[in-house]
């Protein structure tokens, strides 16, 4: 099997203090270049998608607010 393109979809659902939910997602696709593996490209696309979703919610520099230990 030969893989020519790799795609990822990433989204997050956030619940805010007023019981309002917001979902934002992004779908990215890339063509493989010589020497690249599908796994490498998938990992890079996932990183880009996560950054873009975090940017939408305004917390790209603050990490994930749900990662705070209790």
Image (spheres, rainbow, N blue to C red):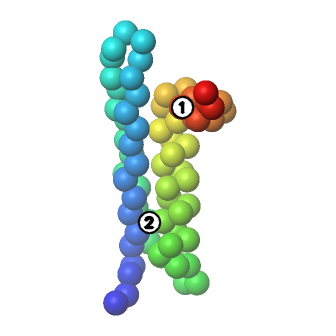
Give coordinates of residue 68: x percent, y percent: 62, 30
Please give left or right for residue 36 compared with residue 8 in the image.
Answer: right
Q: With respect to residue 7, does 48 lie above or below?
A: above
Q: Which of 64 and 69 is in front in this view?
A: 69
Give coordinates of residue 49: x percent, y percent: 48, 49
* CA–CA distance in space, label 1 to label 2: 30 Å
Name the residue rendered at 39%, 79% in the picture.
4
Please give left or right for residue 61 compared with residue 14 in the image.
Answer: right
Q: Name the residue under label 2.
A: 30
Q: Can residue 25 be seen in this view?
A: yes
Q: Name the residue under label 1.
A: 66
Name the residue rendered at 51%, 46% in the picture.
50
Say few, some or many: other residues with alpha carbon within 10 Å of mark 2 (under 14 / 14 to 19 / 20 or more).
some
Q: Do the residues labelled 1 and 2 touch (CB within 8 Å)?
A: no
Residue 13 image label? none
- State the residue lying farthest toward the bottom: 1
Q: With respect to residue 1, does 28 lie above or below?
A: above
- State the residue lying farthest toward the right: 61
């Amino acid at each position: 099997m030969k893989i020519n393109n790799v795609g990822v979809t990433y989204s997050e659902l956030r619940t805010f203090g007023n019981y309002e939910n917001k979902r934002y997602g992004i779908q990215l696709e890339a063509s493989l270049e010589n020497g690249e593996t599908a796994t490498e490209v998938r990992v890079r696309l996932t990183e880009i998608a996560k950054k873009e979703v975090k940017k939408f919610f305004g917390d790209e520099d603050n990490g994930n607010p749900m990662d705070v230990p209790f």
